[in-house]
Image (cartoon, rainbow, N blue to C red):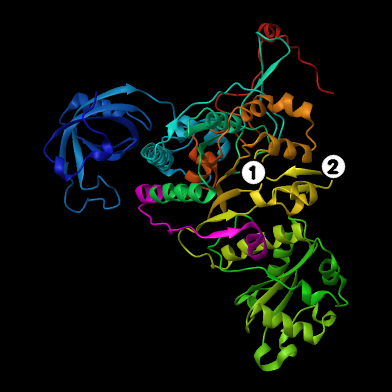
Amino acid sequence: MRTHYCGELNSGLIGQEVILCGWVHRRRDHGGVIFIDLRDREGLIQVVLDPDRAEVFALAEQARSEYVLRIEGRVRPRPEGTVNKDLPTGEVEVLGTGLTILNAAETPPFQLDTHSADTSEEVRLRYRYVDLRRPEMQERLRVRSRVTRVMRNFLDDHGFLDIETPILTKSTPEGARDYLVPSRTHPGEFFALPQSPQLFKQLLMMSGMDRYYQVARCFRDEDLRADRQPEFTQLDIEVSFMTEDALTGLMEEMIRRLFKEVLDTDLPNPFPRLTYAEAMRRFGSDKPDLRVPLELIDVGDLMVDVDFKVFSGPAQDPKGRVVALCLPKGGDLTRREIDEYTKFVGIYGAKGLAYIKVNEWAAKGGEGLQSPILKFLPDATVNDIMTRTGAQDGDLIFFGADRASVVNEAIGALRVRLGQDRGLMEPGWRPLWVVDFPMFEHDAANARWAALHHPFTAPKEDQLDLLETDPGACLSRAYDCVLNGSEIGGGSIRIHRDAVQRRVFQLLNISDQQAEDRFGFLLKALRFGCPPHGGIAFGLDRLVMLMTGATSIRDVMAFPKTQTAACLMTSAPSPVDEVQLKELGLRLRARA
């Protein structure tokens, strides 16, 4: 039906006859000459229709926004002075010689040529098929397509096999809630939608597949936010006979190629590496944004003996932490602005936000400082704080003091917020690997240990004895890939010996019977010659979100759900009729 896409036309095609198909982006009537901006997925072209061809002109008069047209015409240069340098096709236009209205359209719920933030997300999601016509949305999906193509090509070049794993699988209630699917042929029993292909990709390694990948759909029934969806996509990877250093090295090579081919951007080679402990100490986060040149500075040892219990209490607590965060030239912050930051850290559980303004320290010493907490701190302590933070005149020092978990989360978030608000965020891309994660975290509420990643992550070989003697000190062979403060991928070397897997289950209070019920097929496979193996999964939605500059993964998914896990376009989820429920042996019970 067409010879070219609208966005393909350029000066090299001047004089050629073309056939175009697309949507009316904009229609303008200028004194008897009609201009139609015709749009398809590749761009816009201006079409000129004059009254010399009465039948064609009459049809053009009927066309309205979002009508679907087929236009025949000749490419010609735009008249002098009308070239649009902001448009890739702006040097040429098409003189229309034929026009067919393929379909009329109702008035769209919002105008695509004037779309702005004023259009609510609810409206955009309800009419997603219209929203996806916007050039920025189509570009994001094109980038997504290029991203998966580059990744597939890289992995194919390195001997990986693309293998699908089941969508209907067994429920293994670990981590997020499963989406359950009732079985008609097995009444009273349920399949679960996979939260990830984790167990299956390990079984593929036990099957001798050696190198596997899959662009996999995953499902988690959990509370949502901007970067979470009930169904999402990850690039899932597993290999045998490869160390974590070799695996992460290969993966960062893939990410470097991805950014070069899609964004023409060179990433560092190699990516920097931080241990989990160092990342938490310096940045308060296991996914630090290295574009922010601010770091948390421990000052707890300086506060142990001060009379100010807000500081000395956490300083004396093995689970507490006291840190300083020096903001260069932050002395110009008003009290109102400081109060706003105090409210901000309160979101993360902080009870307050102490500070010291450094006005004239160089000339006046302590008298050149301004803070309500100075009266509680000895001069020697203040001198030590100034020396350790390296604060200069005009700076401001914030303090966090509480349980280490609260301080890390609150002051770590404040660090990023200050970087954004104060224009300190360095441009570009800052990837890194975070390694040496703790194997376990203690669940105080339930008085038990829980796996920090998942129960199939391998502990470091020289720390196996810590499983029984000091689980909190045991490190895992896990690794996360972080980009500009977002985790884009995570994985680990897996446990490949049955005896070690059972020891981990015992520590996690998973009985032998529970282990058999949940993971019996995996435990059996471990006893039939399991190779050393490990893998990683990259969050495709989040990665594309970062690469396109979108603020939510919903903007890089064709048909996402709302934050209440609903599809406004299809009205899903929705009731089903009694016949379907009866076939499944189900009956709905009214909620109390």
Front position in the image: 249 or 367:
249
- Residue type beneath disc 2: Asn
User: Please, is residue 59 above or below residue 329 in the view?
Assistant: above
Mark 2 closeness class: few <14, some 14–19, many ≥20 residues within 10 Å = few
Q: Which residue is mark 1?
A: 458
User: Which residues are drawn in magenta?
Assistant: 258-284
Residue 515 drawn in magenta: no
Mark 2 secondary-structure assignment: loop
Front position in the image: 491 or 525:
525
- Residue type beneath disc 1: Ala
Picture coordinates of residue 103, whole percent (x, y): 35, 22
Please report the residue visible at 64 percent of the width from the left and 80 percent of the height from the top. Answer: 391
Can you say which quadrant of the picture contains the C terminus? Answer: top right
Picture coordinates of residue 50, whole percent (x, y): 19, 34
Front position among marks 1 and 2: 1
User: Please, is residue 561 above or below residue 465 in the view?
Assistant: above
Number of numbered labels in the structure image:
2
Q: Which residue is mark 2?
A: 446
Front position in the image: 39 or 245:
245
Front position in the image: 535 or 500:
500
Marks 1/2: CA distance?
24 Å
Mark 1 secondary-structure assignment: loop
Can you say which quadrant of the picture contains the N terminus? Answer: top left
Q: Is residue 416 visible?
A: yes
Please report the residue visible at 35 percent of the width from the left and 48 percent of the height from the top. Answer: 261
